[in-house]
Amino acid sequence: MLRLAPTVRLLQAPLRGWAIPKAHITAKPAKTPTSPKEQTIGLSVTFLSFLLPAGWVLYHLDNYKKSSAA
């Protein structure tokens, strides 16, 4: 057990010197508020970017099965 302590200290030594920067989080309102139209467009584009490729694959799943079976 006595030999374990120096080994642990040796492994922890590089971690002591690292400086982790703090995140700049503020509770202030945005300088330029986002309009409901901009929010709707942003959310729509985000959801479509995930759903369209998945829908494409599901729609063409039979084609993928047939081509891999040959």
Image (cartoon, rainbow, N blue to C red):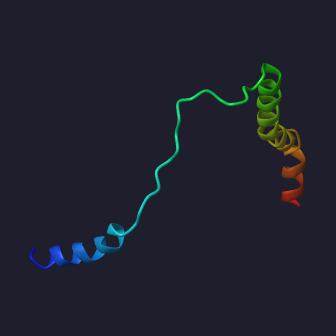
**Across the whole image, how many numbered discs are drawn on residues?**
0
Vertical comparison of 17 with 70: above or below? below
Q: Residue drawn at (18%, 78%), measured in percent from left and top?
A: 6
Taking depth in this image into account, of 45 and 68 the one nearest to the observer is 45
Quadrant in which residue 4 is drawn: bottom left
Whether residue 6 sits left or right of residue 26 in the image: it is left
Q: Position of residue 44 (x, y in %)?
A: 81, 29
Taking depth in this image into account, of 5 and 36 the one nearest to the observer is 36
Q: Position of residue 42 (x, y in %)?
A: 79, 32
Q: Residue drawn at (46%, 50%), measured in percent from left and top?
A: 22
Whether residue 6 sits left or right of residue 15 in the image: it is left
Whether residue 29 sits left or right of residue 15 in the image: it is right
Vertical comparison of 38 with 7: above or below? above
Q: Position of residue 1 (x, y in %)?
A: 10, 73
Taking depth in this image into account, of 21 and 36 the one nearest to the observer is 21
Q: Residue drawn at (77%, 36%), measured in percent from left and top?
A: 46
Residue reaching furthest top?
36
Q: Residue drawn at (41%, 63%), measured in percent from left and top?
A: 19
Vertical comparison of 70 with 35: above or below? below
Q: Position of residue 32 (x, y in %)?
A: 73, 29
